């Protein structure tokens, strides 16, 4: 029953996307970037119910997808509709679209600062006072509504963690280099999985249903390892996972995440990336703790920094990664370690000439259209 239910839900999500709004597939962030750059037209308003229903069906079935993809693209589409209703010009609509994206990310992760910074750092790629003003206002408004409904608690409960001294800072930098390698592997693995799914061919609904059936089986046998992964991230931040299980858990979530994204349903990448960063960071912390006794930094601190470093290496948005992690965990004492970790991750990713994941997905979509 679990397998059949998950297969039916994911197949239905893929059908909704194919039938009514193809732009709703995946995270939608590459499409938003293309719209802001003027290379694609904004999707019509029917994307909102498709993205909403498809996201609920896919993520609710246990696919390893993030909630920020649907919320960002729905926010963008709503902003476009509002701009049209008030007959705003192209410049105003672009600012509104950027603000809608920031509001979507802010709401998804209870992180208003990261929502506004993501717009400037990733979607626009420059500081534009007009867009910054709209993004900040939209993120603040979205968070006000969200917190009035859901409360003001942090997404993750993390103990007070010391940042250590000079030696520990070097270790956080090394963790960033390690996370950069892993993030490049994730990006290339995701693109390879998408290519493999295309070569397999067949109706997208059947492929999605197949992925859903496997996820349904996993959800029946080991429910804690499927889905967006917030529970796993919290376990890693609490230091509740054993070192011997972390490599297998990382590989499993990597494969599950790439397969889930290739299913063609609505869903984002941020939450799965945060899981991979926390798990790899905790593993690194355990090894360092065993190899260098007497450190003032606990392994859980490396898990926090791993989240930001992995996101920075994959998306190539270090400021967004740092602010997002601090706002989600309340670990402002780890700002300097996060800086070191994100620097190391970015350094490796750039040295390997690996495209940021959203840029790679956008280029891949443009190539398939041609």
Image: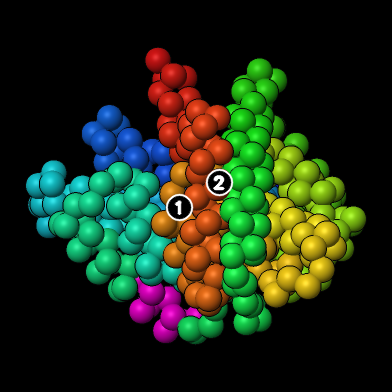
Task: Give the vertical position of 323 relative to 131 (above or below).
Answer: below
Say what secondary structure mark 1 lies in: helix
Residue located 72% across and 53% down the image: 280
Q: Nearer the viewer, residue 350 or 209?
A: 350
The image position of residue 68, as x and y in percent, is 49, 56
**Number of numbered discs:** 2
Task: Give the vertical position of 214 relative to 298 (above or below).
Answer: above
**In this figure, which colouring scheme has been used for the structure?**
rainbow
Magenta part of the chain: 142-150
Task: Using a 10 Å C-alpha cutoff, classify the residue at mark 2 as few (fewer than 14 neighbours), some (14 to 19) or many (20 or more).
Answer: many
Per the picture, the main secondary structure of the magenta-coloured stretch is: helix
Residue denoted by label 2: 345
Task: Using a 10 Å C-alpha cutoff, classify the residue at mark 1 as few (fewer than 14 neighbours), some (14 to 19) or many (20 or more).
Answer: many
The mark that comes first in sequence, 1 or 2, is 1
Say what secondary structure mark 2 lies in: helix
Q: Is residue 354 magenta?
A: no
Task: Give the vertical position of 292 relative to 118 (above or below).
Answer: below
Residue denoted by label 1: 318
The image position of residue 360, as x and y in percent, is 48, 31
Q: Is residue 136 visible?
A: yes
Residue located 30% across and 73% down the image: 141
């Amino acid at each position: 029953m679990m397998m059949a239910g998950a297969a039916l839900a994911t197949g239905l999500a893929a059908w909704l996307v194919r039938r009514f709004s193809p732009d709703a597939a995946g995270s939608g962030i590459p499409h938003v970037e293309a719209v802001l750059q003027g290379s694609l037209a904004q999707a019509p308003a029917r994307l909102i119910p498709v993205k909403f229903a498809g996201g609920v069906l896919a993520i609710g079935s246990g696919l390893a997808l993030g909630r920020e993809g649907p919320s960002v693209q729905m926010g963008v589409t709503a902003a476009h509709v509002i701009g049209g209703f008030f007959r705003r010009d192209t410049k105003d609509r672009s600012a509104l679209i950027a603000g809608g994206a920031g509001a979507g990310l802010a709401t998804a992760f209870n992180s208003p600062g990261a929502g506004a910074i993501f717009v400037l750092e990733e979607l626009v790629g420059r500081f534009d006072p007009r867009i910054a003003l709209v993004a900040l206002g939209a993120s603040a408004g979205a968070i006000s509504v969200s917190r009035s409904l859901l409360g003001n608690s942090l997404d993750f409960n993390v103990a007070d963690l010391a940042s250590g001294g000079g030696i520990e800072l070097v270790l956080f930098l090394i963790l960033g280099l390690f996370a950069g390698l892993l993030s490049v592997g994730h990006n290339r693995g995701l693109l390879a999985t998408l290519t493999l799914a295309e070569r397999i061919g067949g109706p997208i609904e059947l492929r999605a249903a197949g992925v859903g059936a496997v996820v349904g089986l996993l959800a029946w046998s080991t429910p804690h390892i499927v889905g967006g992964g917030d529970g796993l991230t919290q376990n890693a931040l609490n230091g509740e996972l054993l070192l011997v299980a972390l490599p297998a858990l990382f590989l499993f979530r990597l494969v599950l995440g790439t397969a889930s994204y290739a299913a063609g349903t609505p869903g984002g990448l941020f939450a799965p990336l945060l899981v991979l960063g926390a798990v790899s960071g905790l593993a690194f912390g355990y090894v360092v703790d065993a190899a260098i006794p007497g450190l003032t930094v606990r392994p859980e601190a490396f898990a926090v920094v791993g989240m930001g470093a992995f996101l920075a290496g994959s998306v190539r948005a270090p400021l967004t990664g740092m602010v997002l992690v601090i706002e989600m965990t309340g670990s402002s004492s780890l700002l300097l370690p996060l800086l070191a970790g994100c620097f190391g991750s970015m350094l490796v990713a750039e040295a390997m000439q690996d495209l940021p994941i959203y840029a790679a997905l956008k280029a891949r979509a443009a190539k398939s259209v041609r």
